[in-house]
Image (tube, helix red, strand yellow):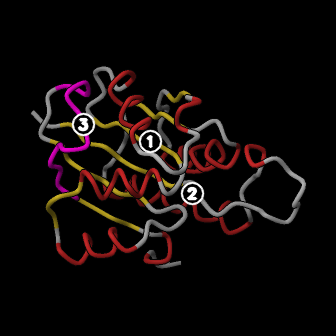
Amino acid sequence: MTRRLVLFRHAKSDWSDPWRADRARPLAPRGMRDAPRMGMWLKRMGIVPDKVLLSPAQRAVQTWTGARDALGEDVPAQTDERLYVFDDHRPLIEVIREKGGDAHTLMIVGHNEALHDLAVALARTGEEAALKRLRKKFPTAAVAVIDLPIDDWQALDETTPGRLVHFMRPKALTP
């Protein structure tokens, strides 16, 4: 049995108000456009998560909302404070292990560098050009889809050898 992990970096955020708290930063117009585009791409690819775990930051919540609306699916989603992390992917693994449950396809909506580091750690095989793009950069609103050879999310750790199935960036989608 395998599990599928979908890592979704929040879309482009709005930096126009320098006094706004980081958690309260909304999406920029580009982010409001890209989140639904990625949701439509997920739908086209037949990638519908069974569960979504997301950072409580406004930009992450708005990213999922835009993608969910375009996906047209009622997917259970919950925020977790531990996903509001930037420089350490280990909390992401903890949350996945604890809250993945029986989801076959689990989506995490979060932040870089933690999301990028987790994707690089897990994506050991796959199409070489996609792996190279992933290793180089995980841009805003990008999605990495990784299949993992585990029967239960509790078996996940940073040494689990996953296969990168897709790595899509909004820029690569036709307008």
Q: Which circle marks residue 108 in the picture?
A: 1
What is the quadrant of residue 134 in the picture?
A: bottom left
- Residue 31 drawn in magenta: no
* Of labels 2 and 1, the one closer to you: 1
Query: What amino acid does circle 3 point to?
Result: Asp
Q: In terms of depth relative to the viewer, which is nearer, 26 or 113?
A: 113
Q: Dot 2: what SS? A: helix
Task: Measure the alpha-carbon separation of dots 3 and 2.
Answer: 31 Å
In what element is the residue under mark 3? loop
Please tell me how crowded label 3 is: few (under 14), some (14-19), or many (20+) other residues with Cα within 10 Å.
Answer: some
Instruction: Note whether 16 is above or below 155 in the view shown.
Output: below
Q: Quadrant of the N terminus?
A: top left
Q: Is residue 27 left or right of residue 3?
A: right
> Which amino acid lies under the numbered mark 1 shown in the image of this protein?
Ile
Image position of 75 (left or right of 122): right
Q: Nearer the viewer, mark 3 or mark 2?
A: 3
Instruction: Please report contact status of discs 3 and 2: CB closer than 8 Å, yes or no.
Output: no
Which kind of residue does numbered mark 2 sit on? Pro
In the image, the segment drawn in magenta is 152-164
Describe residue 37's horizontal placement relative to residue 33 as left or right.
left
Give the distance between the C-alpha atoms of the residues marked 3 and 1, in whole angstroms: 15 Å
Classify residue 88 as left or right of residue 78: left
Q: Which residue sits at x=48%, y=33%?
A: 53
How many marks the image carries: the answer is: 3
> Residue at the location (67% across, 69% down)?
30
> Which badge, 3 or 2, comes first in the chain's sequence?
2
**Crowding near the residue tagged with mark 1, few <14, some 14–19, many ≥20 C-alpha atoms within 10 Å:** many
- Residue position for label 2: 36
Residue depicted at x 48% and y 59%: 38
The residue under label 3 is 157
Q: Position of residue 138 (x, y in %)?
A: 44, 66
x then y, percent, for residue 7:
40, 50
